[in-house]
Image (cartoon, grey):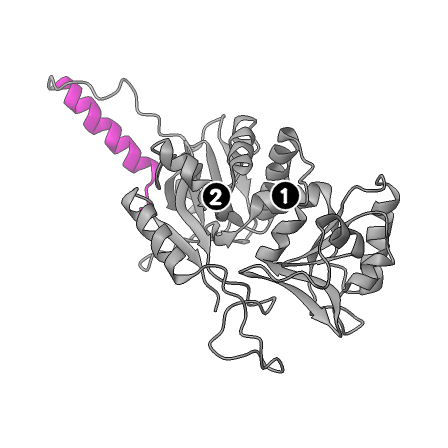
């Protein structure tokens, strides 16, 4: 960044005027040297070695215009400038999230049951309240569950969810995004029994010859849980998560895996003025063929919505102990985690994406 005062800008105006007087082609009729926004009275961390902090900064047309002292930056104001005095607070550049799933998180917050409650009993209570307001046969969905943070010292299981309802299929998704816990009704609807074989890249967990309710990776696909959301709700979900992430200091986000409905939701949010995060959207592998056939590739877009890599997943999750390992998990001598792609599949998709001009991201925790 450059420390620019009003004097510097007036000097620029003088040079422009001199050029006009000497017969040069005009650059502009006027140079507007006033800011749209100034922030003063703070400790602004610039990330520059030779001027690591300043008192204030000015913004124009969404770009930093100047940094410097309170006096210099106030000189760039007009009656139309918004002035914020941060009263000694530290001001940091916006944070960049390198890997998250905002559109899904926003929709969850809007429609589903937050089960980040720290207790099996409290999770049951929250799900029971939702089930009571849900017609029999329709899904009840929980999210943000963490199996390692329950007061009871054990994970949620199928029997716990059966106690909530045997008339509603129920799933509680882990916050890591790679496993879920299902009740007996959900298994029944999906046609899964204790004798059902694991699909490649997935696992139905069993204990003492019975299904525990936990399901991992590709095996979750057999349940076909409907999103139950409208286009308007998906755009609203984006607005909700933008507000939450902005409040945590985030201004730019990489969404790891974006389906067609999420692409539309981000554009809809932008059209309504509620997209306040700059998004780099990694396309899901399933969305890639349609984008490829349309001639779209990595880099298409602008500063608010840009298409990034195509994303594939080769194994599971560290937090859920499903990532593929070269040695078994502690206390589970036969459990090496889960590979969700073969080496041949990896070679095939990487070559295809590379030849089509795409960047490639592959989830591989193990």
**Residue 7 on the magenta segment:** yes
**Residue 170 on the magenta segment:** no
Whether residue 141 is visible: yes
Give SS at disc 1.
Answer: helix
Please provide the residue range marked out in magenta.
Answer: 1-21
Going 78% across and 62% down the picture, which residue do you hit?
158
Reply above or below: 295 against 215.
Answer: above
Reply above or below: 106 against 88.
Answer: above
Give SS at disc 2.
Answer: loop
- Residue that protrudes farthest toward the front in the picture: 195
Going 74% across and 66% down the picture, which residue do you hit?
212
Residue designated by label 1: 106
- Disc 1 vs disc 2: Cβ atoms closer than 8 Å? no
Q: Residue 342: horizontal and vertical position, in percent?
A: 43, 61
Q: Main secondary structure of the magenta part?
A: helix
Count up the numbered dots: 2
Q: Residue 55: horizontal and vertical position, in percent?
A: 45, 50
**Quadrant position of residue 232:** top right
In this rendering, the label closer to the viewer, 1 or 2? 2
Q: Residue 89: horizontal and vertical position, in percent?
A: 55, 53
**Quadrant position of residue 288:** top left
Going 24% across and 31% down the picture, which residue do you hit?
12
Residue designated by label 2: 286
């Amino acid at each position: 960044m450059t420390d620019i005062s009003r004097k510097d800008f007036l000097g620029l105006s003088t040079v422009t005027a001199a050029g006009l007087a000497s017969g040069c082609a005009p650059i502009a009729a006027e140079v507007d040297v006033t800011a749209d926004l100034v922030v003063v009275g703070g400790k602004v961390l610039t990330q520059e070695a030779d001027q690591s902090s300043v008192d204030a900064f000015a913004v124009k047309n969404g770009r930093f215009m100047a940094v410097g002292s309170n006096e210099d930056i106030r000189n760039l104001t007009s009656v139309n400038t918004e002035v914020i005095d941060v009263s000694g607070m530290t001001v940091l550049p916006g944070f960049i999230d390198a890997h998250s799933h905002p559109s899904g998180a926003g929709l969850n917050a809007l429609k589903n049951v937050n089960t980040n409650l720290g207790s099996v009993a409290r999770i049951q209570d929250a799900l029971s309240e939702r089930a009571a307001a849900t017609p029999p046969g329709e899904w009840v969905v929980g999210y943000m569950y963490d199996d390692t943070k329950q007061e009871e010292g054990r994970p949620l299981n199928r029997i716990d969810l059966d106690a909530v309802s045997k008339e509603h299929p129920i799933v509680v998704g882990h916050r890591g995004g790679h496993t879920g816990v299902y009740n007996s009704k959900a298994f029944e609807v999906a046609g899964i029994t204790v004798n059902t074989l694991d699909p490649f890249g997935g696992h139905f967990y069993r204990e003492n010859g019975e299904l525990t309710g936990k399901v991992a990776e590709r095996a979750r696909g057999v349940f076909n849980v409907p999103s139950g959301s409208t286009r308007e709700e998906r755009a609203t979900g984006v607005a909700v998560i933008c507000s939450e992430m902005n409040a945590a200091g985030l201004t730019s986000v990489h969404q790891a895996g974006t389906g067609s409905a999420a692409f539309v939701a981000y554009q809809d949010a932008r059209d309504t003025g509620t997209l306040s995060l700059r998004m780099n959207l990694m396309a899901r592998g399933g969305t890639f063929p349609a984008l490829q056939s349309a001639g779209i590739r990595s880099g298409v877009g602008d500063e608010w919505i840009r298409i990034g890599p195509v994303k594939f997943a080769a194994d599971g999750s560290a937090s859920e102990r499903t990532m593929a390992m070269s040695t078994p998990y502690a206390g589970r001598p036969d459990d090496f985690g889960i590979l969700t792609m073969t080496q041949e599949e990896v070679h095939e998709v990487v070559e295809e994406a590379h030849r089509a001009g795409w960047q490639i991201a592959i989830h591989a925790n193990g």
